[in-house]
Amino acid sequence: MSDGLKINSPFGEFTIPFNEEAVLDFARKINHAAESESTLEEKAICDYLNSKELDELESEWLFWEDKKVPVCLHDLDSWLNRDFEIKHTSSYSNYGRKLANIIYQKFKYPEGEKRFATRILYFLTHKHTGISYVWKVMPLDGIHIECQIFVNANDEGASIEAIKTSFDTFVQTEGVLKNNAFNANYQFISKPETTFQDVVMSEEQDRVIQRNIVKFVGNLSFYEERNLPTSRGVLITGPPGTGKTLTCSAVMNEVECTLIYITADAIQEQGKIEELYELAQGLSPTVVIVEDIDTLGGLDRRETGNHPLLGEFLNCMNGVKSNDGVITIATTNYPEHLDKALTRAGRFDIKLEFGLPNEKLRMHILEKYLSETNRGKNIKINELVKKTEGFTGAFLKEIVMLATISAFEENGYDSKTKIEQKHLEEALDSLLENRNDHLQTKQSTNTGFHH
């Protein structure tokens, strides 16, 4: 052992008295004292639960990732106030050695902004059993939450598993996600104002949507009582701009149930689809909407072949686990690139094609959008219908929109301005010109030639 610490300096070498064994012995004493001495937090928990040592208590950890924190805190607060009498609360810092302020954070919910504690100890008594519990909430890395539940195992009927089950049941039956709309990241989304009156579809398409989604969700008990399947899958196909997304928006506005809206970019890793479907089943009846299913996971099956998340999705829709009460709606521009196992009955029972509108439907679309404007008396819609063969409903809507803008500009934005035939013809010509320019540019790019 060294009796001193030698240091070289600009003024020469000098020695600081130092005994390594004495220093190590002092460090051991400090560590032993720290380990054996209970913190203020531990003493408070033990005193409340009538225990001498923390190690004598039964405890278990829960972990909530950042995306789930707002939902879990909301449900925890509601559940605690329903089932427990909160005797008092406190908070500690410096690893439980110092009494501190309770930390709160604001979150947004469908009913508005609310504030919940992210660092707190709840000292509780169950309203029905009289058993005492301590529930600890602590932030982790600033964005996640760790919870620890304590109970005295000697208390008759004490069970952390029963408490966890009670909380899980509350989440599924009365939690904030129930009968609300949210995305794959557990963020609440507002239901669109779109109705089926805003969607231009054939009578057959409307009948299929009503029978297999809207009325199906509203009458699940009818199928349950007859031991019939209560899950359904509807695959909506068609080129971009034909009304697939608009139809999904109308469904979201029409049905009264839990809604989970999934976009391809939100599913990047295995396990996420299974997690969302387990949630959908727990919160059923649930409508799961998957936009552009062919690009699920950020990968396009036209380029990658077998999809890395396909097996997981197949199993969730009709695998070993029950899918009761879950209706899946998926859209795709490229149904031919989907695996046949995905599109079979039992997964997607109904395939609804939104093709390019025929002459009758184009007439209906133009009439619909023009009826919302101040139109002139001499408009000849038949001429527009003939010139727009092969175009989508979105293209027809844009004709009316562009014509409206042109008419208002021409008349100095006079509120009494009327949309005339010339405005519609000019709008159509302009859109056709832009479309042709776009196609030529795309073709030039693909062949390697540039103008």
Image (cartoon, rainbow, N blue to C red):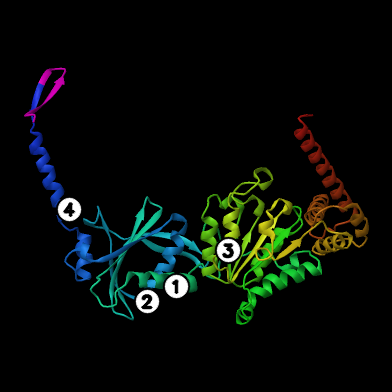
Write the residue at 93% across / 56% down: 383
Q: CA distance from mark 3 to mark 4?
A: 50 Å
Report which quarter residue 329 is drawn in.
bottom right
Q: Kindly report which numbered mark, 3 or 4, lies closer to the viewer in this rendering.
A: 3
User: Which residue does the numbered mark 2 point to in the structure image?
Assistant: 83
Residue 108 or 57: which is nearer the viewer?
Answer: 57
User: Which residue does the numbered mark 4 point to in the structure image?
Assistant: 35
Three-letter residue code for mark 4:
Glu
Residue 21 makes an appearance in the image? yes
Q: CA distance from mark 3 to mark 2?
A: 36 Å
User: Which residue does the numbered mark 3 point to in the structure image?
Assistant: 319
Q: Confirm or deny contact between disc 3 and disc 2 (CB under 8 A).
A: no
Q: CA distance from mark 2 to mark 4?
A: 36 Å
Write the residue at 79% across / 52% down: 405
Q: CA distance from mark 2 to mark 1?
A: 10 Å
Q: Kindly report which numbered mark, 3 or 2, lies closer to the viewer in this rendering.
A: 3
- The quadrant of the picture occupied by the C terminus is top right
Mark 2: secondary structure: helix
Mark 1: secondary structure: helix
Q: Is residue 235 above or below residue 10?
A: below
Q: Earlier in the sequence, mark 3 or mark 4?
A: 4
Please provide percent x and percent y for residue 125. Answer: 29, 75
User: Which residue does the numbered mark 1 point to in the structure image?
Assistant: 170
Three-letter residue code for mark 2:
Asp
Q: Confirm or deny contact between disc 2 and disc 4 (CB under 8 A).
A: no
Q: Confirm or deny contact between disc 2 and disc 1 (CB under 8 A).
A: yes
Q: Which residues are magenta?
A: 1-13
Report which quarter residue 60 is drawn in.
bottom left
Three-letter residue code for mark 3:
Gly
